[in-house]
């Protein structure tokens, strides 16, 4: 019943998370105070009078999307004659374990694509506006060519632009395969990759960055000082196949930076060529300046 009425409930997946999280066979089913509180809250919401309006194809239509640490949210609404916005429907869902590890910009892009797909019956064949609080998406979706988009954002756009409609499970399989392709094409052996995974787990900066990726970035003032230098690139940072990465580059923990720098300089290449080597494989804050020095 709750799922059937979900389109009447804003932030439905976030509200229900303490309950839906127990549906996994990896956790013990427990009914305690948080679950009871959510259950009672949901009962109250479902027994209240929601205010939704009937869709009018002649009115300006807006799709608003957002993402939390563990869920996607989308709303379709229309602008009325008096300037008010009236909600047509709400939609939300929980992020999969794979999606939780996406970089923030990839989660926000996913929310936009999913929201448009969810409300396709309203949107197909008409002009509409997409509203997001994530400013970097504006240039990605409206200005850049497809080839300029990086990583999963580009892959998602390729999949969605194909004529054959993809089911969610098929899209997930495509994304997982793309992630595997990235990690398998890195210029390092599996032994070195395992060593870097272990080193990242021990590195305090990498641990905090991973935590921000999985739980969401705080405001700039609240970011740990160790991670402040990474703030400007926060939307590109993700966890792929257990590796903390910026785009397609592995973030190298401090304990291995000297060794990696030595490998970069093998062959005594110039500054430009050394920097080019790093742009396809490794990254840490200030690496370009270190190479120059």
Image (spheres, helix red, strand yellow):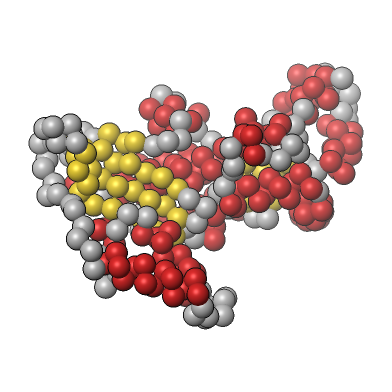
Query: Which picture quadrant has residue 246?
Result: top right
- Compared with 213, 132 (above or below) is above
- Compared with 36, 81 (above or below) is above
- Compared with 176, 4 (above or below) is below
In this rendering, position of residue 46 left or right of residue 154: left
Query: Which picture quadrant has residue 251?
Result: top right
| Residue at (66, 39) in percent of width and height | 223
In this rendering, position of residue 248 left or right of residue 1: right
| Residue at (43, 71) in percent of width and height | 37
Query: Which picture quadrant has residue 258?
Result: top right
Q: Is residue 138 visible?
A: yes
- Compared with 178, 13 (above or below) is below
| Residue at (88, 30) in percent of width and height | 266
Q: Position of residue 132 (x, y in %)?
A: 39, 37
- Picture quarter with the N terminus: bottom left
- Closest to the observer, 271 or 127: 127
Q: Position of residue 2 (x, y in %)?
A: 30, 69
- Picture quarter with the C terminus: top right
Q: Is residue 187 visible?
A: no
In this rendering, position of residue 184 left or right of residue 179: right
| Residue at (49, 71) in percent of width and height | 34
Q: Position of residue 116 (x, y in %)?
A: 30, 45
Count of number-bearing discs? 0
Q: Position of residue 102 (x, y in %)?
A: 55, 49
């Amino acid at each position: 019943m709750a799922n059937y009425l979900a389109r009447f409930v804003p932030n439905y997946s976030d509200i229900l998370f303490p309950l839906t999280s127990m549906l996994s066979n990896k956790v013990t089913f427990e009914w305690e105070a948080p679950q009871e509180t959510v259950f009672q809250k949901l009962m109250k919401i479902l027994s209240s009078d929601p205010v939704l309006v009937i869709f009018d194809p002649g009115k300006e239509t807006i799709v608003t999307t957002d993402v939390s640490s563990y869920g996607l949210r989308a709303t379709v609404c229309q602008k009325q004659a008096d300037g008010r916005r009236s909600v047509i429907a709400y939609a939300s869902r929980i992020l999969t374990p794979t999606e939780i590890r996406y970089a923030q910009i990839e989660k926000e892009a996913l929310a936009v694509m999913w929201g448009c797909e969810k409300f396709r019956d309203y949107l197909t064949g008409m002009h509409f506006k997409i509203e997001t609080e994530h400013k970097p998406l504006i240039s990605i979706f409206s200005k850049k060519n497809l080839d300029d988009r990086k990583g999963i954002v580009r892959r998602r756009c390729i999949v969605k632009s194909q004529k054959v409609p993809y089911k969610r499970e098929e899209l997930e399989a495509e994304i997982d395969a793309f992630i595997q392709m990235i990690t398998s094409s890195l210029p390092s052996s599996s032994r070195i990759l395992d060593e870097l995974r272990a080193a990242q787990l021990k590195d305090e900066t990498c641990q905090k960055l991973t935590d921000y990726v999985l739980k969401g970035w705080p405001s700039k003032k609240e970011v740990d000082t160790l991670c402040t230098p990474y703030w400007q690139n926060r939307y590109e940072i993700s966890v792929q196949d257990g590796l903390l990465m910026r785009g397609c580059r592995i973030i190298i923990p401090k304990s291995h930076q000297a060794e990696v720098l030595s490998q970069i300089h093998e062959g005594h290449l110039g500054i430009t060529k050394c920097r080019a080597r790093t742009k396809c494989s490794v990254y840490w804050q200030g690496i370009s300046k270190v190479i120059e020095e």
